[in-house]
Amino acid sequence: MKVSLTCRVNGEGVCGTIEPSMTLLNFLRHDLKLFGTKEGCGEGECGACTVIMNGVAVNACLVLAVEAENTEITTVEGLSCGGELSTLQSEFIKQDALQCGFCTPGMLMSARALLDRTSDPTETEMKEAIAGNLCRCTGYVSILAAIASTAKTEREGEGRK
Amino acid sequence: MLSEFNVVKPQTVEEALTYLERKDHITKVLAGGTDLLVILRRSLKMPDLLLDIKGIEETKRLEFTSGVGLFVGASVTVNQVADSEIIQRKYQALGQAAQTLGSYQVRNRATLVGNICNASPGADLAAPLLVYEANVHIASKTGRRTIPLTEFFTGVKKTALASNELVVGISLPDPSSGDQSVYLRQARIKGHDLGIVGVAVRLTAYQRFLVAISAVAPTPVRLFALEESLNDQWNSPEIAVFAGEEIQMLIHPISDVRASAEYRLHIAGVLVKRAVALLTMTGGT
């Protein structure tokens, strides 16, 4: 029996009619056609499906769509503004923090959630924040550099784009 | 795709229990879902109904009352536990263990009570809860009961919970000032990984040791025999080394994909030695 779902995704109100067994990840990709959020393992190990739900990073594969009722969700599509990349996205490019790009949406959302809760994260905090995001290309060093340089840029007043 | 089921979100414990009484349905309780959704994805269990308990006020309580202790409701997430200032200050091992469970994203969903109800032999939060002599608060239509956590685990992924019962929360007594504890865990990598061995050691203000360990037996266990030996010689300068050797006589771990039995035995000794040394400042690391 299908049920209705109302939530906000990237600032816009969204209504849907869904199977109760649908995951938030499938709702975003299949119903809303937001293909930025990736499915990797589907079991909360790889972090490719990370989105921000009510301000905190979660694995969209481990959340049922019905659990997102009345929540505020941000996906990677919600980071850019008016077609312009955010500081975080620009820094990922500048620091070569991606190669194949599959983990990148999840990395960006874990990093965004971190920078939203602390403007000056330590290296340990950065590593902890992305410990649940696997990347098989970069070796993580450039990703940490991109998060650190974003934090610096945002602190220096240019703020979040 | 997950198997077919319906989801209900009751607002009270009473309402939730009504669903659990229904005999014509296989009902599973949904809190954080970080274990349940993996099981459903693998189609290992096919429930008809998921009971989302996150709407129940009582399960959202994370409260400390001086002289009484701590109550952690069944919807309280692991990150809420890790970030709690009072837990970091009064229940150090619990805060440390909460910080090591899964990944940051998983901790934002996973609940402390879910970790216990899942009853994995390696449950990260079990050992700290055992050394704080936690009690499990259980509700059913016939009333409420409270049992010690030591009686809650009955086997690998098995608990004393009946199918019509719901865990509402877990409580921990208020430790006296001067009470200290530490949680040490060995895993293959520092980040998101299951533990190979997890050790919690607590030294009360009255020089009484409490020791619990996970991932070396079918359930997480309190090591009462080790505690007795340690209590007999709490002021010995050799106590940490003794603890590290003694524990290896008391546990019988198995080999699995994460570690061999021999490695588990060795690392349990190392972790207990380190933990006792940290708490007694006797060195030994």
Image: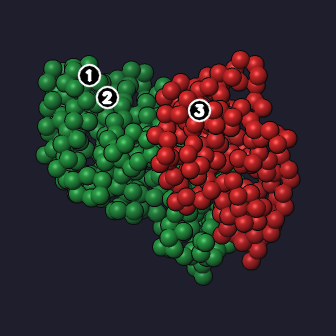
Image position of A101 (left or right of B147): right
User: Which chain wears green?
Assistant: B
Q: Which amino acid does label 1 sit on?
A: Thr
Q: Which of B177 and A32 is in front in this view?
A: A32
Q: Which chain letter matches label 2?
A: B
- State how far apart marks 1 and 3 are (Cα): 47 Å
Residue at image coords 53%, 34%: A142
**Is residue B171 visible in the rendered structure shown here?**
no
Q: Quadrant of the C terminus of chain B?
A: top left
Residue at image coords 70%, 58%: A35
Q: Which amino acid does label 2 sit on?
A: Leu
Q: Say if mark 3 contacts mark 2, CB within 8 Å.
A: no
Q: In which quarter of the image is the N terminus of chain B?
A: bottom right
Pointer 2 local density, CA inside 10 Å: few below 14, some 14–19, many at least 20: many
**Is residue A39 visible in the rendered structure shown here?**
yes
Is residue A68 depicted above or below A112 in this figure? below
Q: Say if mark 2 contacts mark 1, CB within 8 Å.
A: yes
Task: Look at mark 1 in the image and give the residue it sits on.
Answer: B280
Identify the element where label 3 is drawn. Answer: loop
- State how far apart marks 3 and 2 are (Cα): 48 Å
Image position of B255 (left or right of B64): left
Task: Look at mark 3 in the image and give the residue it sits on.
Answer: A95
Task: Look at mark 2 in the image and give the residue it sits on.
Answer: B203
Q: Which chain letter matches label 3?
A: A
**Between disc 2 and disc 1, whose residue precedes?**
2
